[in-house]
Image: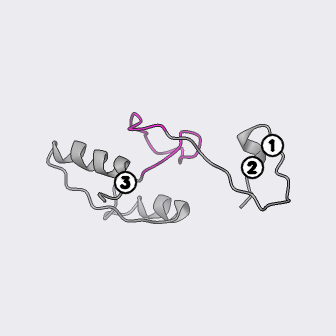
Amino acid sequence: PGQGIAASALKKALEKENIRVKFTFLSWSDAIEKSRDEKHVGFFPAYISEHPADYALSDPLFQSPLGFVRTKGKDLKWTVLADLKGLR
């Protein structure tokens, strides 16, 4: 309902400024690409470490944990987030 608590909060905040919001659900790379056209003006959620250099970030609406899933029996060894880059 409401497309999630973060979407609902963002929509309510922007409606107070008379800004109408419509959400489109896309992959990360498609969200970046489409946010540059005239029909889209931004994207969320975004993580501070993973946004285009030419974008400005607003203050966070929420903070949430990240979870990782791995195939049973396959070890996943990492110590910093950069170790996970390129994994699916």
Which amino acid, by three-letter code, is at mark 2? Leu
Q: Residue 4: give its label.
A: 3
Picture quadrant of residue 60: top left
Residue 55 left/right relative to 10: right
Q: Earlier in the sequence, mark 2 or mark 3?
A: 3
Camera-side residue of 84 and 41:
84
**Measured Cα–Cα span from mark 2 to mark 3:** 27 Å
**Measured Cα–Cα span from mark 2 to mark 1:** 7 Å
Q: Which residues are magenta?
A: 44-63
- Callouts 2 and 1 close, C-beta under 8 Å: yes
Q: Residue furthest front?
A: 72
Q: Say whether residue 17 is magenta.
A: no
Q: Circle 2 is placed at which residue position?
A: 84
Q: Earlier in the sequence, mark 3 or mark 1?
A: 3
- How busy is the neighbourhood of tag 2: few (under 14 within 10 Å), some, or many (20 plus)? few
Percent x, y of residue 57: 43, 39
Percent x, y of residue 62: 42, 38
Secondary structure beneath dot 2 equals helix
What is the magenta segment's predominant secondary structure? loop
Q: Circle 1 is placed at which residue position?
A: 78
Percent x, y of residue 31: 47, 61
Quarter of the image with the N terminus is bottom left
